[in-house]
Image: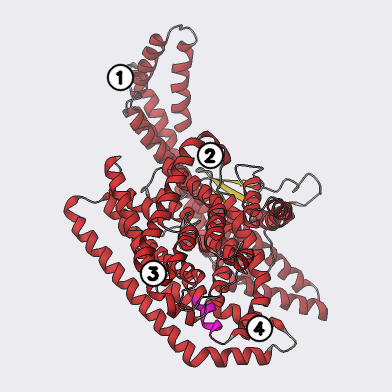
């Protein structure tokens, strides 16, 4: 009936349209065709005859379908009662009959869905775009469900084929005697089948009915050399499909994370090629920056720019590269903590706690003021100000690497103050990530619920402060009772074998990272505290561990800075260079002035000279603004344009940071220490 109705409607529309010339007459033909198909413009006898014939055919098909279903039920009962069939043969035949029953039922459902869709389309207004869009959405959902059902039926047919093969093998085994080797292989085959059934996760069946799960159409992109350079059988091609790439309608790309068959080892060749390419290109880029007097980290960022979406676009596994780069941040902060002994932390803890808090409050206040003048939403102003108030810990730790940290009598070391404030900013980052969902809700809520949102934010702040207290209490217990015996055991077991020492230190770092993450504090703080706890065991311990961990840190840091370059877009910077330079200089100057003002109030009089160096170290924007900006853009807090501005300002501020740092070092640090600091 569906095909007959479609052909008749197409005939009615197409025959007159070939003889018409202007659009108005086309519209009249469409209206006439719709009326005719609804029955309003047809002769009564013709209309009745068409309806009777269509209904007679449809009812005949439905009767035949019911007869076949009854025969299939009888056949299933006969097979189950047949004692001459083996269990494998019964399973195969019953499975085949059940699949055929499902196919008949689904075909009947498809007929009535098509009739319902045609009726809905004819009753709608063809000029109403919203109505046609809703109809298209419903058809798309129906097609997705049909595709899922067809996939399930295909899987069931594969299972039935497997049962058929097993039945044939059993018949062959019954007709001939097996050798000892054949019997062993048969036992191994059955054990392998049981293993596959035990380890196989029915993730598709378990999650397709879960709330929030949507069916979507995706494209599967195969390897370029899959069929062109080798003659692979169909089965080999199907095995290779697991490492192909999926692309959805939103242009998101997906790769395999867990295969159905876990017994076969697989490797993501895209990810391997990406890491190899970054490693090879980072060397000349790092050499170039060293030759012109820039830190090597900018060479790694340039490497990411060249390989990323704005360059050659050769990096396929961007998310995986960024994830690996995060370990560079973890080990960088661990080594920062390793050089940051508890004695130094105890000396500057008040400054480290007060300075970032005052700066963040002042930045938010200025942001709200400018937001009010520019008519920007308060939630957006708070978010942008908080993003810009953070500074880059990995960058500053690179500046401080290898510098002389000797203090004058009674003075405070500038590196201790700077690292302490940066670690406190990492804690603020964890706090802000925890508060962000409430900030999103506050942006969408009405004025009547603002007090509830403020109360919720205060409760979250209380929870974070409680978590911080718990973390530091745990650190006190570890330092007093556990870290000493733990390191001595590692040192005793690792004589002549550094592998145990590296693994033990890494495991301890990841343990602290996990604890702080479970307590809703930033993971970076856990890495820093792990290094600080180990540094309490003495200078010799620090030197030994640093020699082992530094090469790992250096390699992972290359990946991290290259991943930053993947989000740098030179064309956008060139198009808006004037605006971006003005914004970047404004942010850098504002952060520098606010840092100088705050440090002037909280530093002792004998250490006032270090405020210029510390302020220069803080006068840039943290790379974590990329993470915060992406989350805020997905949540609707900021627009695409604001997100690109944040990325560009962050990148330019990081590029300006070495020049400002060197100027401060030249002004404030004595000549012997200046040579090692730069």
Q: Mark 1 to mark 4: distance in Å?
A: 87 Å
Residue 550 position within the rendered picture, expressed as x and y whole percent measured from the top left: 65, 71
Q: Is residue 643 visible?
A: no
Question: Is residue 58 depicted above or below 385 in this figure?
Answer: above
Return the x and y of residue 193 as percentages of the image width and height: 65, 72
Left or right of 470 in this view: 289? right
- Can you tell which of label 2 and label 1 is closer to the viewer? 2
Q: Position of residue 187 (x, y in %)?
A: 72, 78
Characterize the magenta stretch by its predominant secondary structure.
helix
- The residue pinned by badge 3 equals 603
**Which residue lies at the image location 65% right of the left edge and 66% below the top edge?**
554
Nearest to the eye among marks 3 and 2: give it.
3
Per the rendered image, the range of residues in magenta is: 529-537
Q: Secondary structure at mark 2?
A: helix
Earlier in the chain: of badge 3 and badge 2, it is 2
- Which residue was labeled with disc 4? 501
Looking at the rendered image, the quarter that the C terminus falls into is: bottom right
Quadrant of the drawing holding the N terminus:
top left
Question: Which residue is under mark 2?
Answer: 573
């Amino acid at each position: 009936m569906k095909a007959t109705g479609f052909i008749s409607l197409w005939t009615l529309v197409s025959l007159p349209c070939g003889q018409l010339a202007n659009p108005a007459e086309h519209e009249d033909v469409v209206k006439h065709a719709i009326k005719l198909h609804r029955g309003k413009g047809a002769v009564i006898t013709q209309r009745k005859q068409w309806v009777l014939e269509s209904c007679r055919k449809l009812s005949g098909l439905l009767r035949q379908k019911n007869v076949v279903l009854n025969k299939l039920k009888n056949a299933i009962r006969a097979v189950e009662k047949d004692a001459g069939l083996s269990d494998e043969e019964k399973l195969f035949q019953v499975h085949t009959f059940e699949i055929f029953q499902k196919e008949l039922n689904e075909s009947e459902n498809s007929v009535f869905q098509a009739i319902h869709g045609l009726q809905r389309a004819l009753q709608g207004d063809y000029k109403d775009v919203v109505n046609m869009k809703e109809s298209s959405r419903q058809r798309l959902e129906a097609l997705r469900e049909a595709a899922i059902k067809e996939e399930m039926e295909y899987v069931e047919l594969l299972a039935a084929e497997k049962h058929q093969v097993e039945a044939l093998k059993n018949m062959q085994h019954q007709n001939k005697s097996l050798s000892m080797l054949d019997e062993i292989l048969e036992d191994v085959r059955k054990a392998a089948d049981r293993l596959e059934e035990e380890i196989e996760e029915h993730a598709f069946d378990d999650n397709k009915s879960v709330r929030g799960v949507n069916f979507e159409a995706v494209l599967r992109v195969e390897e370029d050399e899959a069929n062109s350079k080798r003659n692979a059988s169909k089965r080999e091609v199907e095995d290779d499909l697991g490492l192909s790439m999926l692309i959805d309608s939103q242009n998101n790309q997906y790769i395999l994370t867990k295969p159905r068959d876990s017994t076969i080892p697989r490797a993501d060749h895209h990810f391997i090629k990406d890491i190899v390419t970054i490693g090879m290109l980072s060397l000349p880029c790092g050499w170039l920056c060293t030759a012109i007097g820039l830190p090597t980290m900018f060479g790694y960022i340039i490497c990411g720019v060249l390989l990323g979406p704005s360059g050659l676009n050769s990096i396929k596994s961007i998310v995986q590269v960024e994830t690996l780069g995060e370990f560079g941040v973890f080990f960088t902060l661990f080594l920062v903590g390793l050089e940051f002994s508890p004695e130094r932390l105890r000396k500057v803890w008040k400054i480290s706690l007060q300075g970032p808090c005052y700066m963040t409050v002042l930045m938010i206040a200025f942001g709200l003021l400018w937001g009010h003048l520019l008519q920007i939403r308060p939630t957006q102003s708070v978010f942008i100000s908080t993003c810009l108030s953070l500074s880059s810990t990995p960058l500053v730790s690179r500046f401080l690497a290898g510098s002389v940290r000797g203090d004058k009598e009674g003075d405070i070391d500038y590196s201790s103050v700077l690292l302490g404030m940066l670690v406190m900013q990492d804690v603020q980052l964890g706090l802000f990530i925890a508060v962000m969902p409430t900030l999103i809700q506050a942006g969408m809520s009405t004025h009547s619920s603002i007090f509830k949102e403020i109360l919720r934010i205060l409760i979250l702040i209380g929870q974070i402060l409680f978590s911080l207290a718990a973390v530091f209490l745990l650190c006190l217990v570890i330092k007093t009772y556990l870290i000493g015996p733990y390191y001595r055991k590692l040192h005793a077991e690792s004589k002549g074998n550094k592998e145990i020492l590296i693994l033990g230190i890494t495991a301890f770092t990841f343990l602290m990272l996990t604890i702080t993450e479970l307590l809703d504090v930033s993971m970076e703080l856990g890495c820093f505290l792990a290094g600080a706890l180990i540094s309490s065991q003495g200078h010799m311990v620090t030197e030994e561990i640093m020699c082992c961990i530094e090469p790992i840190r250096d390699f992972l840091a290359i990946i991290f800075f290259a991943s930053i370059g993947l989000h740098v877009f030179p064309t956008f910077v060139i198009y808006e260079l004037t605006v971006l330079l003005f914004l970047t200089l404004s942010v850098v100057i504002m952060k520098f002035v606010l840092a100088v003002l705050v440090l002037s109030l909280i530093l002792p009089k004998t250490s006032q000279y270090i405020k210029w160096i510390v302020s220069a170290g803080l006068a840039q924007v943290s790379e974590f603004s990329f993470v915060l900006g992406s989350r805020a853009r997905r949540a609707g807090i900021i627009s695409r344009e604001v997100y690109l501005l944040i990325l560009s300002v962050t990148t330019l501020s990081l590029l300006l940071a070495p020049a400002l740092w060197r100027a401060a070092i030249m002004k404030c640090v004595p000549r012997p220490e200046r040579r090692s600091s730069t």
